Image (tube, helix red, strand yellow):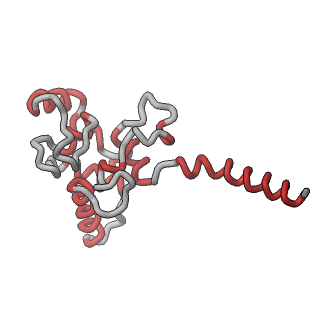
Amino acid sequence: MKGARLAGVLIAAALALSVPAALALPQYRTAAIRQFHYDEGNPLWEYDRGVMACTFCHVRASGGAPWNPFGEEIRAAFRADAQAGGRVKFPAVLGKVLAAGKDADGDGYADALEVWAKTLPGDPQSHPDQPVAELEEAFGAAGGEALYVPRGGK
């Protein structure tokens, strides 16, 4: 009886200790959230899956393959940097993709504008409500693509 109780306590303790790890977001996602400044004003952002959905880069809400057009842009940038022989770092690749001014999903809004407006740059059905020119002006006044340059420029 004591052995069963002890086993139950140990299992409960292991589960309790693993909850923060299970709730934590994947490393690329946490890096992107910080780089996009989506963590600002939310002290529990690391446990808030609503801060940035997996569908930011992936087709499925659960993540993994396949990737949407924005995710494919990031993957292509990773491959290009790796082929160039450099040590590939996610924040630098992400900054480079956004600085390119592309519109991965073809909805008329550049990826960086969609990141700033907190819409999905890989989903043509998700785009800002504001007209492009108005949004570009506000984005430029806020700092433009420079907002997404990784800390230290790398």
Numbered marks: total: 0
* Left or right: where 142 falls relative to 48: left
Residue that lies at the very extreme toward the front in this rendered image: 1
Residue 122 drawn above or below residue 66: above
In the image, farthest residue toward the right: 2
Which x, y percent locates residue 145?
A: 22, 40
Q: Residue at x 16, y 46 (%)?
A: 124
Residue lying at 24% horizontally and 56% vertically, measured from the top left: 68
Q: Nearer the viewer, residue 150 or 90?
A: 90
Residue occupying image coordinates x 14% and y 32%: 136
74 left or right of 34 in image: left
Write the residue at 68% across / 48% down. 16
Q: Quadrant of the N terminus?
A: bottom right
Question: In the figure, is residue 91 to the left or right of 49?
Answer: left
Image quadrant in which you'd find residue 132:
top left
Above or below, 37 relative to 57: above
Left or right: residue 105 versus residue 46 is left
The residue closer to the viewer here, 151 or 61, is 61
**Is 132 above or below relative to 148?**
above
Q: Position of residue 8 (x, y in %)?
A: 78, 54
Estimate the x, y position of residue 107 in percent, counting from the top left.
12, 44
